[in-house]
Amino acid sequence: MRAWVLGIAAVMLLGACAAESVWAPDEAVARAAYRHDGPPRLTVFTMINNKTGAGAHTSLMINGSQRVIFDPAGSFKHETIPERNDVLFGITPQVADVYTRYHARKTFHVKIQELDVSPELAERAIQLVKANGPVPNAACSVATSRILAELFPGQVRRSWSPRKTAEDFGNIPGVREQELYEYDSDDNSRVLAAWTPGQTTAATGSE
């Protein structure tokens, strides 16, 4: 009973601080659209505290008819990257690289999990994240896991825990995993400030 009451309280609290809608213009989204020439693929990013091992953030990159990142309640923002309600467009190799490095620093590392999928499943994933709407703070994992649960019923559970979402996704046959460690300052805004669009400075597993 206590767990149920706490769950209801959490939902009410999130509802009280609804996320703000962001909607880039059609021309900006169309201009930025990019499809990576690799296979249709889902990539789950999980940001993990280096000291405690706790999960801090979950997001999902999808390569289908175009490549997008679903970054629910995320802080990654750049004037050259159009966003519509937590969906980032124009995810070129350079953007994927800086996105990953933005989250890796001395206190956090990034678990990168990749799964090649059918074109149909990748396209369904894109449609689901586009339809999801803005996500409130602290709901990144439950939003991402809800999408994954629709794509992989019975294999991924809806969860508020980034670690549990990563664990479920990692149990799907074919998932490849790696981890990115960097030791920059916790002020990750410097990564974006120093970034020049069109430039790649480090390799990630997202290509």
Image (cartoon, helix red, strand yellow):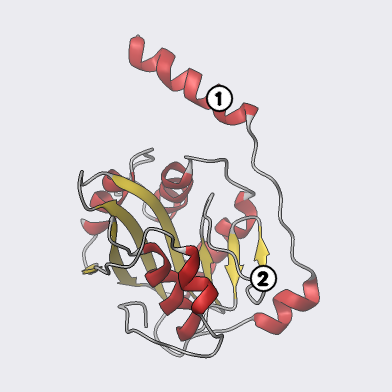
* Alpha carbons under labels 1 and 2: distance apart: 29 Å
Q: What residue did someone put label 1 on?
A: 13
Horizontal placement of 197 versus 109: left or right? right
Q: What element carries label 2?
A: loop
Residue 32 image position (x, y, % from top left): 66, 81
Residue 152 image position (x, y, % from top left): 36, 54
Q: Which of 110 and 142 is in front in this view?
A: 110
Q: What element carries label 1?
A: helix
Label 1 is placed on what type of residue? Leu
> Compared with residue 163, is residue 119 higher up or lower down, i.e. above or below?
below
Q: Which mark is residue 82?
A: 2
The residue located at (39%, 51%) in the rendering is 57
Q: Residue 47 carries which label?
A: none
- Chain-order first, disc 1 or disc 2: 1
The residue located at (52%, 72%) in the rendering is 192
> Compared with residue 165, is residue 27 higher up or lower down, i.e. above or below?
below
